[in-house]
Image (tube, rainbow, N blue to C red):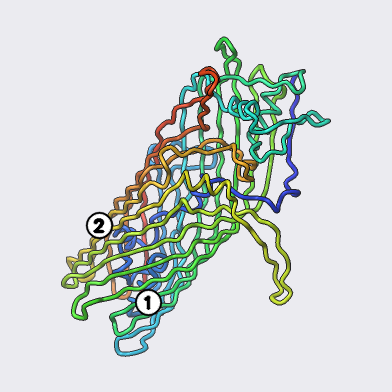
Amino acid sequence: MKRLIFIFAASSLFLSTYAQETYENANIATEDLNGTARYVGMGGALDALGADISTIGTNPAGIGMFRHSTANVSIGMVSQQDAQSFANGNKTNMSFDQAGFVYSRRTGRNSFLNVAFNYHKSRNFDYILSASNSLNGASQNKLSYIKGAAGVFDVSTNNNGTVSSNSNAFSQVDYLYYNVLLQNAGSEGSFYYNNASGYAFDRSNTGYIGEYDYNISGNINDRVYLGLTFGISDVHYKGYSEYTEALVDANNGSVGSVTLADERRITGTGFNIKAGVIIRPVETSPFRIGLSIATPTWYDLTTTNYTTLVNNSTVGAYDSGSIGETYDFKLYTPWKFGFSLGTTVANCLAIGAGYEYSDYSSLDSRINTGGGYDWYYDSYYENSSSDDNMNRHTEYTLKGVNTVKVGLEYKPESNFAIRLGYNYVSPMYQSDGYKDGTLNSPGSYYASATDYTNWKSTNRITCGFGYNVGKLSLDLAYQYSVQSGDFSPFVNYYSSDSAEDNNICDAVKVDNKRHQLLFTLGYHF
């Protein structure tokens, strides 16, 4: 009878050499279209029009357009289309999306100085992914075996029978497979893989990134508007997945299944600086041009996982094994540049358009290299350096992203507004990108899953309306977001010796279709 084992790596010895993996970094670095209902209802195309608190994070000069003080709070509901609830993930969730205020003070006949604070949920991680497909002889456990057989890493057996390696390419997934399934029962140091006929995968992501923005802005003679925003980001991510393979023997007969269950949490903080300008080139025209720039968000993050391999087959050495790790790393997101246009017509029509560019191939995964204590400032500091191997992989896997925003607002009456918008985000991932578990990088060593999705472009269609009652404003917006991607449970391996040694699994299409309802209550004073 096989026995139950628990395997825990000693993470405390390696806290000075941690980094992260490209696909998980990309998940942290991206943003949603979110904010006030007016901002969302117009597709985010307010960067040149301004006078909406959500522009604090896109073009800070938009806060300089305010002529009176205001406060807003926004709540909403997000629902994922065609999803089935899994683990702690639900297809429909309530969301607290925004809260902030602007204090406006006149400094001249046509000049104002404004200060503002705004919280908004820049990233909503709530998402359920399900995928399944035939494997036709390929398997995740074969990939771990191939990595050892091809010399990507060497393995050795300790006195207690635990299989380990000193290579960064020996991931937590490899660790579990070599100890539970690949090791033949009663034959220490002898390894063999099993093919699989198919797989089933489910993952639920929950959590958010909260953005806290502090702004100072103003205008000069109602012609030039300037703004500066300091932002703090707060990361709360939790993901849980189960990957099951139906194993077969050499004659393609069923021998049971194996399930890899993985729970990962990522928490931490980051900060960034954003600056913007809006210009009215013609004094007698409401037409305006906006320019903006945002520094990277400099993240200091901690990731924790608990991963279990359950062997419900007649092969392998043990029934199950588990591993848990906690480590710290740094991530610097790319710079972001924006250009926008806007105008109004007869006080009843506002039209806006915007363009943003950010090169995600320049995401910087960083390894903590130690630090010290600054006696002068009475504070601790921590040094880091770029993880060159992982960053080269990121440069190959990700690319520059273009975001286009267009929107309009029509007021048939002075206190009632109708809004429409469209928001397009080009693909971040190269179509032939993949999660490379062979890199000499801590990001590979601490990986506890092999799956990846190359997401394609995002299309968002928005609409909404607003109604003013005295100093009170009521706004409602609807957003439909659709994105598709190619999901792979593990990277393909092509053998130069024999086609029988290939380990190839075709990608399957997955979708992320979301509906959002957003309500904003505002007060002007």
> Which residue is farthest bottom?
108
Query: In which quadrant of the rendered image does the N terminus lie?
Result: top right
**Which mark, by number, is residue 343?**
none
The residue lying toward the viewer, choosing from 504 and 410, is: 504
x and y percent of residue 121 in the render?
A: 46, 58
Q: Quadrant of residue 254?
A: top right
> Which residue is farthest front?
496
* Residue 72 vertical position relative to residue 260 in the rendered view, above or below: below
x and y percent of residue 238 in the render?
A: 56, 47
x and y percent of residue 227 in the render?
A: 40, 75
Nearest to N terminus: mark 2 or mark 1? 1
Density class for disc 1 (Cα within 10 Å; few <14, some 14-19, many ≥20) is many
Q: Amino acid at mark 1?
A: Leu
Q: Looking at the image, which residue is at 57% across and 9% down?
A: 251
Residue carrying label 2: 420
> Which residue is farthest top?
251
Q: Looking at the image, which residue is at 45% across and 61% down?
A: 335
SS at mark 1 in the image = strand
SS at mark 2 in the image = strand
Q: Amino acid at mark 2?
A: Leu
* Residue 343 vertical position relative to residue 269 in the rendered view, above or below: below
Q: Looking at the image, which residue is at 62% across and 57% down?
A: 385
Q: Quadrant of residue 448?
A: top right
The residue lying toward the viewer, choosing from 511 and 152, is: 152
Image check: 415 left or right of 424? left
Density class for disc 2 (Cα within 10 Å; few <14, some 14-19, many ≥20) is many
The residue lying toward the viewer, choosing from 249 and 513, is: 249
Image check: 5 left or right of 513? right
Residue carrying label 1: 226
x and y percent of residue 300 in the render?
A: 60, 58
Query: In which quadrant of the rendered image does the C terminus lie?
Result: bottom left
